[in-house]
Each structure stands twice: as structure tokens, then as C-alpha cells.
């Protein structure tokens, strides 16, 4: 159904909000103020299934309910299995907690030298700058703190975080996340980026945000100018399904690209949303058309109450296998598991290497054909020369 129409973007205009003025509709603050946050508001627009009704009843204890009007319009209201609906409308199943599930599924709390700053890898940090998002994904990996439904009481410590980064010269890469950093005001973002840019050892600054997908109206000229001023700022957006690739998202991505922001995409593999090769292929092709490079495909973390959204690892491997070699290499993300307990992201790949012997490596290509590549014994002719050369470039 999706692969045939790769260049047409799915778009429904203002949909249910047709009576709203264009000015309001295009205002990101209007979109935020008019979010759907209660079961009554939801029921004004669609018929909830009993499963969903129960989910809404519990949502305030787990992860708040919020959906921007823009994103709500993408839901097929006649289809309880709509892939957009599954991402943002709570379900009673969220209250089923299985023994392997964790409140802190990727072990962030143990690597937080400062509240909100995760320093797990040697040269980079994850800086959580807010606990708010424009809409809430039901599979949120940080549902323990995001939306503050679980009394975590998160308060971002900007100054402490910045001070830690200043004092740790090994940090060359800062990833702003949350919550969604693009919910901060322009002034606050400008300030944060300026402070980070002034730290000589910070080379690489990036933002993880689902705002372009939930609230494309936020990508204003002023915001783009801030990115231009402090650039290069890299950004990872988060799309899961081709239906999210609307004209409005494309416009937002264009603006970011023209402001010099290189774009990547992170998806989560979700049961009944994108665990299908044709749907996923259609998504990555649309991303390339928007100048977005697929970066990671995540196995869904072991978040409490996420069993109904998780899939078999084999499905992810199958999707990668279905892409690699069959379509542009640029369209193929890295499939990863963010290891429970704080091990970080670990790549999961189809088995292309069949065997390595002393004399050869035996490989399988994308069509399943076997190829051999001989392994030489003296590939490094003069190790000392090479080391001198390495020293030269490092100076
Ligand atoms: C994902 C993540 C990063 C960034 O990882 P990359 O593989 O460099 O994109 C950094 N720190 C933490 C804690 C992370 O979870």
C-alpha cells in the first residue's frame, strides 16, 4: 500500500480544526495550548476502544496524555489499529508490567554525575534539558521522568551540567535531549548553545527532537537563525511510519537543512506500527527525499508496560536484510539494542560474515550468494613509518 506512492506526502490540511484561522494553526504556541490531554477531549473526536479508555484512565500515573492537533489529524479515526494512534493513545496494556521490564530501562541513573547529565561513553554526554514533550509517545524510554507523571520531579540543572562539561575536557560531543529540547524558548536555546560553543573542547553539538514530527510549526525562522549562528548543530528527528512524512514535516526539514542543520532519523521498531519491510522501506525513502539520513533503528527498550509494542529482534534483522543491498545504502539505518543495565547501544547485524579462516574471509551478499576474500599476511609493510605518520596528523 505504501511503496507505490513514494513521492506523494500524506497531508490532510487542518482536518478537524478547519474552523481555526490559518494564523493560529501555524502558531506553535496555539498548537501546544490546544493539545488533546483528556479522555473527554479524545472522545469528542473519536470512539475509544475499551482498551484505550482504560489506558487513558491510568495515563496520569504513568505518562501523561498529550497530542498536538497537528499530529492528531494524522490518526485514522476509523481504525483502532492505526499506526499513528498506537504511538500516542494510551492503552490499558501499559499497566501490565512483566518481570524483565525496568523503570530505567537503559540504566541512565547510574551514569549521572549531575542530575540530567548522562556520561556513559568516553567522549560524549547526553544532556537532558527538559522533561516536557509536545506529545507523549507511549513507549517513552524516559517515562520515569518525562511528563512528571511518576513524581520523579525532574528539574534540569543547566548551570551544573554546563560546569561539568567545562571541567571535563574529554567531552567533545554534547547531545541535548529530554523531553524535547525544542520546547525551550528561543532565548533559552540561544543561551545554552552559546555556552556550549564557548567551551573549547566541545566540537560536536546535536539535538534529539521529535518536534519536527509533532509540532513542525516550532521550526520558525528565528529558531533556524539560532542554529545558523551557533552551527554546525546536528539534529536527529524521530519518525516511525511513512504517514508521518507530511508536507509540513518536509517544510520543517527543508528549513533546518537550509539553516545548515544536518538531519538524521531515529526510529523505534514497534509492533503494529512499523514492523514490516514494505512500510519501513517506504519510510526511509521518504526520509531521503526530505534530506534526512536514517541513523538508528532501535529495538524497543524494556520499558515498563511496553510488551504490546515490542517485537521480536528477528523482525529488526529481517528489515535490515530487506534494505541492505536492495536499496540505497544511505537509506539503511543501524539496528541497535540499547543494552539494559547501561551497556550503551550495541549494533545488531544480519550475518554477512560466514567464516574467517587464516587465509580467507567467507561472505554472504544480500542475495545470499557466497563470496571469498583472501587475507594477506603482510598488509602493514612498515609499522614504524605508519606510526610516525599517525603522529604527524595528530599534532
Ligand atoms: C545514545 C546516547 C549517546 C549518543 O550515542 P551515539 O551512538 O554517538 O549517537 C550518548 N550518550 C548516551 C547516554 C546515549 O544514550
Image: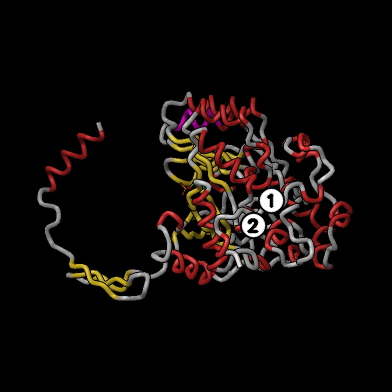
Of all residues shown, which one is farthest toward the bottom?
369
Q: CA distance from mark 1 to mark 2?
A: 28 Å
Residue marked by disc 1: 144
Q: Is residue 235 left or right of residue 305?
A: left
Image quadrant assignment for residue 97: bottom right
The residue nearer to you, when weighing 395 against 78, is 78
Q: Earlier in the sequence, mark 1 or mark 2?
A: 1
The residue shown at (49%, 53%) is 294
Read off the magenta span: 162-168
x, y percent for residue 358: 18, 70
Q: Secondary structure at mark 2?
A: helix
For the residues labelled 1 and 2, say whether their Cβ atoms are less than 8 Å apart: no
Which residue shows up at 86% across the image and 51% down it?
Answer: 41
Within-10-Å neighbours for mark 2: few <14, some 14–19, many 20+: some
What secondary structure is found at the residue carrying circle 1? loop
Q: Which residue is mark 2?
A: 243
Quarter of the picture containing the N terminus is bottom right
Residue 219 in which image quadrant: top right
Q: What label does residue 172 carry, if any?
A: none
Amino acid at each position: 500500500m505504501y511503496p507505490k506512492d513514494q513521492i506523494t506526502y500524506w497531508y490532510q490540511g487542518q482536518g478537524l480544526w478547519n474552523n481555526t484561522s490559518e494564523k493560529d494553526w501555524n502558531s506553535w504556541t496555539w498548537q501546544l495550548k490546544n493539545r488533546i490531554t483528556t479522555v473527554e477531549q479524545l472522545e469528542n473526536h473519536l470512539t475509544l476502544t475499551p482498551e484505550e479508555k482504560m489506558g487513558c484512565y491510568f495515563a496520569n500515573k504513568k505518562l501523561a496524555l498529550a497530542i498536538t492537533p497537528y499530529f492528531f489529524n494524522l490518526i485514522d479515526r476509523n481504525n483502532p489499529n492505526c499506526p499513528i494512534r498506537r504511538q500516542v493513545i494510551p492503552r490499558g496494556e501499559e499497566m501490565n508490567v512483566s518481570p524483565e521490564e525496568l523503570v530505567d530501562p537503559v540504566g541512565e541513573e547510574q551514569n549521572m554525575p549531575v542530575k540530567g547529565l548522562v556520561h556513559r561513553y568516553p567522549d560524549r554526554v547526553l544532556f537532558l534539558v527538559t522533561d516536557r514533550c509536545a506529545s507523549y509517545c507511549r513507549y517513552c524510554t524516559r517515562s520515569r521522568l518525562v511528563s512528571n507523571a511518576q513524581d520523579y520531579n525532574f528539574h534540569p540543572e543547566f548551570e551544573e551540567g554546563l560546569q561539568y562539561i567545562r571541567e571535563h575536557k574529554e567531552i567533545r560531543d554534547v547531545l541535548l535531549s529530554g523531553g524535547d529540547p525544542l520546547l525551550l524558548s528561543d532565548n533559552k536555546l540561544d543561551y545554552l548553545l552559546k555556552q556550549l560553543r564557548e567551551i573549547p573542547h566541545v566540537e560536536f553539538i546535536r539535538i534529539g527532537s521529535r518536534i519536527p514530527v509533532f509540532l513542525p510549526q516550532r521550526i520558525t525562522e528565528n529558531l533556524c537563525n539560532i542554529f545558523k549562528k551557533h552551527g554546525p548543530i546536528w539534529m536527529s528527528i524521530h519518525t516511525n511510519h511513512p504517514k508521518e512524512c507530511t508536507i509540513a514535516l518536509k517544510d520543517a526539514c527543508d528549513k533546518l537543512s537550509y539553516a545548515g542543520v544536518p538531519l538524521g532519523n531515529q526510529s523505534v521498531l514497534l509492533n503494529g506500527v512499523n514492523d514490516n519491510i514494505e512500510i519501513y522501506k517506504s519510510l526511509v525513502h521518504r526520509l531521503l527525499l526530505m534530506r534526512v539520513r536514517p541513523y538508528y533503528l532501535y529495538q524497543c527498550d524494556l520499558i515498563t508496560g511496553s510488551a504490546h509494542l515490542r517485537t521480536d529482534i528477528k523482525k529488526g534483522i529481517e528489515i535490515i536484510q530487506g534494505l541492505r543491498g536492495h536499496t540505497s545504502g544511505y537509506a539503511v539505518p543501524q539496528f541497535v539494542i540499547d543494552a539494559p543495565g547501561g551497556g550503551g547501544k550495541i549494533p545488531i547485524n544480519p550475518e554477512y560474515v560466514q567464516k574467517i579462516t587464516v587465509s580467507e574471509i567467507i561472505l554472504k551478499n544480500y542475495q545470499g550468494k557466497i563470496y571469498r576474500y583472501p587475507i594477506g599476511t603482510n598488509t602493514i609493510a612498515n609499522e614504524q613509518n605508519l606510526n610516525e605518520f599517525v603522529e604527524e596528523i595528530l599534532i
